[in-house]
Amino acid sequence: MTEITLENVSKYFGKVKAVENLNLKIRNKEFMVLLGPSGCGKTTTLRIIAGLESPTSGSLAFDGKDVTDLEPKKRNVAMVFQDYALYPHMSVYDNITLALKVKKVHREEIMERAKRTAEMLGIEELLHRKPSELSGGQKQRVALARAIIRDPSVYLFDEPLSNIDAILRVRMRAELKKLHERLGTTTVYVTHDQVEAMVLADRIALMKDGKLLQVDQPRKIYDHPTTKFAAEFIGTPSMNFVECSLLRKNKEAYLDAGSFRYRIPDKFLNALAQLSGSEVLLGIRPENVRVSTKGKKGDIEAEVYLLQHLGDVGYLTVAVGQHLITAKIDPTLKHKEGEKVYLSFDEDFLHIIDKSTEKVAI
């Protein structure tokens, strides 16, 4: 098993900065997900680990040994690509055993490893088929089998589920999670799908514009984002953001949104010293917004704008002046457009974000 260390890694394509000064340690047996939007540098980082790209600067180590200039074939890594990269003229058996044949592994051992791997992934009946005879999910399993049969020290996945339908994608996520638990091999997984990242990752490395923004367990990033981007990118629906001005009066502080004013709980007052100015964003997730038809002191008056029923969950979007705020509600509740309701926030999950730096103060 392998620990991977990227130290001050940068990669430039001409004048374009694909990755900038990346420092990341991937623990032995960890399932690390590189998450971010298209063009954030996550696939380039994966290719640097694989040896398919050389860093412009910085170093890469496996278990403390520098492998920055080591050839890909000597790194003992297996990569699963987005497009599966199966040889169309070969059978499934030949596709998954090719690497072992190149290494001149004994024929009986190849057959035994192919049988064991096929059973693990449920593709025993597909071994004599060609890729053109397979569904998307079956091709994905064959690509996984080709990686697993090599018994590598590191698995690298480049958006492997993006080409299969939504229902199968959910099932394959679960299978990948169980597979990692069974094999216990260090895994680096690239995706732009935050739900996929939340389900699979031991830790998430969140990237944007070639930079690493935050590394932590999925739930910790969800509950304690350090930037507006992290707060916005992780979670569906996205966090609500309301532009406010920070006001202080005596020993109290308020967020003034124009159409409403919200008193900041005393326990957060010391954290406000981090702010660079008075222009801030109030951030609150839909599940931390409470909606009532009867207001009490401190509640915010609002008007129903849109109701969405999604089976086992409902989302109510309300207008507070020019601001729209979405709340997660009981799907059995019924509200009419224009109806007056009242909002309150769960203060334990309130975020205040510096508008100029986009850093989270609370």
Image (cartoon, rainbow, N blue to C red):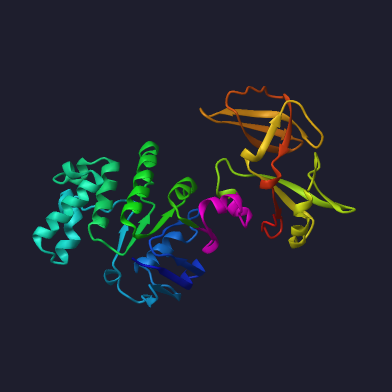
Is 3 or 35 nearer to us in this picture? 3
Q: Position of residue 313 (x, y in %)?
A: 55, 31
Q: Is residue 304 left or right of residue 122?
A: right
Note whether 343 is above or below 270 in the view shown: above
Count of labels in the image: 0
Residue nearest the viewer, comparing 95 with 225: 225
Q: Is residue 89 visible?
A: no
Say whether residue 328 is magenta.
Answer: no
Instruction: Pick whichever, 149 or 185, lies toward us.
Output: 185
Instruction: Give percent across and percent down for residue 193.
Output: 47, 48
Residue at 69% of width from left, 42% of height from top? Answer: 346
Q: Residue at x 13, y 66 (%)?
A: 104
Residue sitting at x 42%, y 72%: 55
> 219 and 156: which one is in front?
219
In the picture, the quarter occupied by the C terminus is bottom right
Magenta segment: does it hold 222?
yes
Where is residue 225, by image quadrant?
Answer: bottom right
Any part of residue 218 in sight: yes
On the rendered image, what quadrant is the N terminus found in? bottom left
User: Residue 328: x, y in percent?
Assistant: 61, 34
Tell me: residue 74, above or below residue 33.
below
Q: Residue furthest right?
A: 250
Query: Which image quarter: residue 276?
Result: bottom right
24 with respect to 100 (left or right): right
x%, y% of residue 91?
15, 49
Magenta segment: 205-231
